[in-house]
Image (cartoon, rainbow, N blue to C red):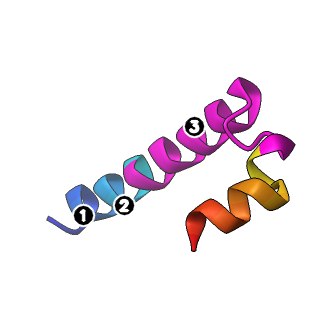
């Protein structure tokens, strides 16, 4: 049972890292998202 829990946690972390890497590669963290106009729209 402990092995299953450990595997689940490891798989979850791996998926999170892959999603983060895909976001960086895909430009989701583009600098244009941090323009003054975007900051005002967020408020």
Image location (x, y in percent) of residue 42 = 58, 66
Note whether 10 is above or below 42 in the view shown.
above
Disc number lying in front (1 or 2): 2
Given contact means CB atoms under 8 Å apart, are the residues at marks 1 and 2 in contact? yes
Q: How crowded is mark 1: few (under 14 residues within 10 Å), some or many (20 or more)?
A: few
Image x and y of residue 28, in percent? 66, 37
Q: Considering only vertical position in the picture, is 38 above or below 2?
A: above
Tag 3: Cα neighbours inside 10 Å, few (<14), some, or many (≥20)?
few
Residue under label 3: 18
Q: Distance between the residues labelled 3 and 1?
A: 20 Å
Q: Give the SS element for disc 2.
A: helix
Identify the residue at horizontal 51%, vertical 45% (top origin). 14
Q: Can you say which quadrant of the picture contains the C terminus?
A: bottom right
- Residue 1: give x, y in percent of width and height: 14, 64
User: Dominant secondary structure of the magenta stretch?
Assistant: helix
Hey, which quadrant is residue 32 in on the image? top right
Vertical comparison of 40 with 4: above or below: below
Q: Which mark is residue 5?
A: 1
Mark 3, secondary structure of its residue: helix
Q: Looking at the picture, does residue 11 appear above or below residue 41?
A: above
- In-front residue for pair 25/7: 25
Q: Mark 2 points at which residue?
A: 9
Residue at 39% across, 47% down: 11
- Residue with the most extreme left position: 1
Closer-to-camera residue (27/18) = 27
């Amino acid at each position: 049972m402990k092995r299953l829990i450990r595997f689940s946690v490891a798989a979850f972390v791996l998926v999170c890292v892959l999603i983060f890497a895909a976001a960086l590669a895909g430009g989701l963290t583009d600098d244009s998202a941090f323009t003054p106009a975007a900051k005002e729209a967020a408020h």
